[in-house]
Amino acid sequence: MKKDFLCLSDWSRAELDGIFALTRELKEKQKRGEPHRLLEGQTLGMLFEKSSTRTRVSFEVGMFQLGGHALFLSSSTTQMGRGEPVKDTGRVMSRYVDGIMIRTFSQEAVEELGRWSDIPIINGLTDMYHPCQVMADLFTVIEHKGAIEGLKYCWIGDGNNMANSWINAAAVFGFELRVATPKGYEPHPEVVARAKAAGASILYTDDPAQAAAGADVLNTDVWASMGQEQEQKEREKAFAGFQIDGGIVSAAAPGCIVLHCLPAHRGEEISNEVIEGPHSVVFDEAENRLHVQKAIMATLMGSRL
Ligand code: CP
Ligand code: NVA
C-alpha cells in the first residue's frame, strides 16, 4: 500500500522520528562523500504551478544523490496548465515515474492526485500546508537545540501554509506553540480545532512581544504568499509591527534560534539585523530541505525497489 506525504498530521510521531533518524544518516553519508543510492534508477516527477528555488533544487539534487532522476514539469509547459484533469495526470504519471512532488494552490487537488495515483505523492507546498519545510525546520531545531521537546515555539506573522503546518507539528510532537497574527490573518480555524482536539497547546495572541516572551524558537514567513501578490499593499498595513526584529529577539530566550523558510522580505516580516545576526539559522534550515526530503523520498519510494 503506497503512502503519501501530504500533511504532517497524517503521520505519527514514531514515523516522523524515523524520517529524522534517516535524515541524520543520509546527511552524514553525504558529508562524508559516501554513496547512498537508495532510489537507484527511480524517477521523481516534480509538478510546479508556483515558483520555487529551494524546493525544485533540493528535490532534484536529492534524487540525483539517491541514484535516481527528477523531472521538472511546470503547469505552463504541460497539459495541466491547459486544464487536463488531475485524475488523468495522476493515472498517466503513475505509468512513467515512481513518485510525484507537487507544488500547487489547492490542498484538495493534491489529495485528489493522491487518490488517482498508484505512486507516492509529496506535497511541495499548497495554500494550506508546507509539510516538507516544517520537517526541515524541526530537523534544524534538533541540530541546534538537541531535541524538539522542552522548548517554547513562537510563530509571528501570517497565519498561512507555514503556520498551519507548524500547528500540525505542535499536535504530532506535543510542544507548546504561541501564534501571533494580526486580526483577520489567523491560521485556518479547522487546522487549529483539529490540533487542539488532538491535545495540542496552541496559544493565540495579536501581540508579537507576548508570543515571543521566553521563546526558544522564533519563526516567521512573508506577509503575502504566492498567489496573494495583489494584497501586498493592504498586508503591509495590516502586518505593521509583526516583524521579528531586535526587540522581539530580546524578549525571547537568550539562546533562541530564528527560522524563516525563505525567501525573506527584509524590513517586512524580519529585520536585516536579525536574519543576518547570530540567532538566525535560516541557511542551515534551507540546507536541511535537501537532507530531510531525501529521507522522505527514500521512506515513501524505497519499498518500491
Ligand atoms: N522555502 C521554500 O519552499 O522555498 P522555494 O519557494 O524557493 O521552494
Ligand atoms: N508562505 C509562502 C512560503 C514560500 C516558501 C508562500 O506560500 O508563498
Image (tube, grey):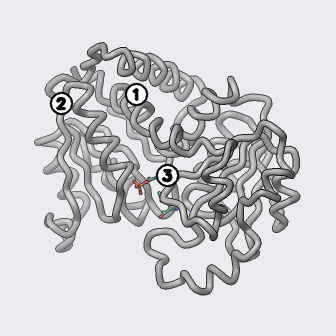
Image coordinates for residue 206, horizontal then vertical, percent: 82, 68
The mark nearer the N terminus, 3 or 2, is 2
The mark nearer the N terminus, 1 or 2, is 2
The mark nearer the N terminus, 1 or 3, is 3
The residue pinned by badge 3 equals 130
Q: Would residue 73 appear left or right of 131 to someone viewing this image?
A: left
- Considering the numbered disc 2 on the image, is that residue within a helix, a strand or a loop? loop
Cα–Cα span, label 3 and label 2: 24 Å
Image coordinates for residue 280, horizontal then vertical, percent: 64, 45
- Considering the numbered disc 1 on the image, is that residue within a helix, a strand or a loop? helix
The residue pinned by badge 1 equals 295
Cα–Cα span, label 1 and label 2: 15 Å
- Between residues 79 and 156, which one lies in front from this camera angle? 156
Q: Which mark is residue 42?
A: 2
Residue in view at x 55 percent, y 44 percent: 134
Crowd band around label 3 with a 10 angstrom C-alpha radius: few (<14), some (14–19), many (20+): many
Q: In the rendered structure, are the residues bearing label 3 and label 2 in contact, judged by CB atoms less than 8 Å apart?
A: no
